[in-house]
């Protein structure tokens, strides 16, 4: 059964996201073949259209202030580094660098790519605050069509 | 061994079966043990001594302490869990079936720590993730350090009770 054939790995490049990456790699043993790696930017100095594709829409890149261009370039480099790691594991990889509401974009990419599973990190500490404010992982769990694997590690550890 | 020991909370609703194929598939990624846990909520079962009920004998011993109807109900649930456990056993996954009284999140949190669980696999309904109910699922996620796999089932199917 192709339950883990195509997964979405959402990364914010945090240490917890690196822990989640170990799970993505491990799932290859359970039939995973393709990984869609997603990073969503929501902190540029100018407002872009929701869902803007910062990896492929070159015109958008040009209108960004220099500081944002450097930031986006560094994010692309980090995504490419993740791609290299996963490809070295024998997995096929597709990258997304989106602008907008983080959970909304993760769920939209998951639907577009018809992934079977979303893998992402969730911080334990301060989760109550996140519940009240609406955390990324909560919104993804609630709105995704597919199962979600939340990787946790308490910050105090 | 990221998926070696999986905790599978069981609540007798069809939704909890949605996660079963995923656990079976994880055998290929190193899953060796599944712990099926039914949490006896105080509101449902009244006062039951805080023990790990992992055999019919232990449940039978409750007769006299709690209503016979409750004991019969517990045995019925235990047998259903054993039936599901059989599927894991047949695939070569060692399985423990256990019932523990307590609050859902606290009991799951205790179990994860006590038994070195590597993954909690939760089968839930769409309804349980609605704005007013999502807190229970989040309480479980908050209560454990291990990763949590959440598998959703449509409300109309998932809410039905298992026979």
Image (cartoon, helix red, strand yellow):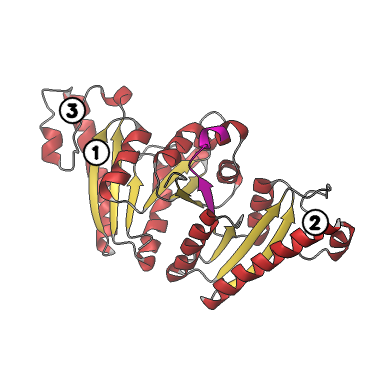
* Label 2 secondary element: helix
Q: Say the numbered circle drawn on residue B99.
A: 1
Q: Position of residue B42 (x, y in %)?
A: 29, 25
Q: Residue at x 59, y 48 (%)?
A: A144
Highlighted magenta segment, given as a residue range: A119-129
Q: Position of residue A120 (x, y in %)?
A: 54, 53
Mark 3 falls within which chain?
A: B
* Gap between marks 2 and 3 measured at Cα: 61 Å
Mark 3 Cα-neighbour bin, 10 Å: few <14, some 14–19, many ≥20: few
Q: Position of residue B12 (x, y in %)?
A: 34, 39
Residue A131 versus residue B71: which sits nearer the camera? A131
Q: Which residue is mark 2?
A: A68
On whether disc 2 and disc 1 are found on a single subunit, the reply is no
Tell me whether circle 3 and circle 1 mark residues in contact (CB < 8 Å).
no
- Which of the two labelled residues, at mark 3 and mark 1, occupies the earlier sequence position? 3
Number of marks in the image? 3
Q: Is residue B88 left or right of residue B54?
A: right
Q: Quadrant of the C terminus of chain B?
A: top left
Q: Quadrant of the N terminus of chain B?
A: bottom left
* Tag nearer the camera, 2 or 3: 2
* Gap between marks 3 and 1 measured at Cα: 11 Å
Q: Is residue B52 left or right of residue A84?
A: left
Mark 1 Cα-neighbour bin, 10 Å: few <14, some 14–19, many ≥20: many
A8 lies above or below B14: below
Q: Residue at x 18, y 38 (%)?
A: B53
Q: Position of residue A1 (x, y in %)?
A: 45, 66
Residue B84 visible in rendering = no
Mark 2 falls within which chain?
A: A
Picture quadrant of residue B103: top left
Q: Say the numbered circle drawn on residue B49.
A: 3
Residue B142 visible in rendering = yes
Q: Residue at x 18, y 28 (%)?
A: B49
């Amino acid at each position: 059964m192709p339950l883990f054939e195509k997964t979405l790995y959402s990364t914010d490049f945090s240490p917890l996201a690196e822990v989640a990456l170990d799970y993505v790699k491990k799932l290859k043993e359970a039939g995973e073949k393709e990984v869609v790696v997603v990073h969503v930017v929501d902190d540029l100095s100018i407002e872009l259209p929701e869902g803007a594709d910062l990896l492929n829409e070159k015109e958008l890149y040009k209108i960004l202030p220099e500081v944002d261009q450097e930031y986006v370039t560094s994010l692309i480099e980090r995504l490419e580094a993740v791609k290299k790691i996963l490809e070295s594991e024998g997995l096929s990889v597709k990258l997304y660098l989106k602008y907008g509401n983080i959970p909304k974009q993760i769920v939209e990419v998951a639907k577009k790519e018809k992934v079977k599973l979303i893998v992402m990190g969730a911080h334990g500490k301060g989760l109550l605050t996140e519940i009240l404010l609406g955390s990324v992982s909560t919104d993804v769990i609630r709105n995704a069509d597919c199962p979600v694997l939340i990787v946790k590690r308490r910050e105090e550890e | 061994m990221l998926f070696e020991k999986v905790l599978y909370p069981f609540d007798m609703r069809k939704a909890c079966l949605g996660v079963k194929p995923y656990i079976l598939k994880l055998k290929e990624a190193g899953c060796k043990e599944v712990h099926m846990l039914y949490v006896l909520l105080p509101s449902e079962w009244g006062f039951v001594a805080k023990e790990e009920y992992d055999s019919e004998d232990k449940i039978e011993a409750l007769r006299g302490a709690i209503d016979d109807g409750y004991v019969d109900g517990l045995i019925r649930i235990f047998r259903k869990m054993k039936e599901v456990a059989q599927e894991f056993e047949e695939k070569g996954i060692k399985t423990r079936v256990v019932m523990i009284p307590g609050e859902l999140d606290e009991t799951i949190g205790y179990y994860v720590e006590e038994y070195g669980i590597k993954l909690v696999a939760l089968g839930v309904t769409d309804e349980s993730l609605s704005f007013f109910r999502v807190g229970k699922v989040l309480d479980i996620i908050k209560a454990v350090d291990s990763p949590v796999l959440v598998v959703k089932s449509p409300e109309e199917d998932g809410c039905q009770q298992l026979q």
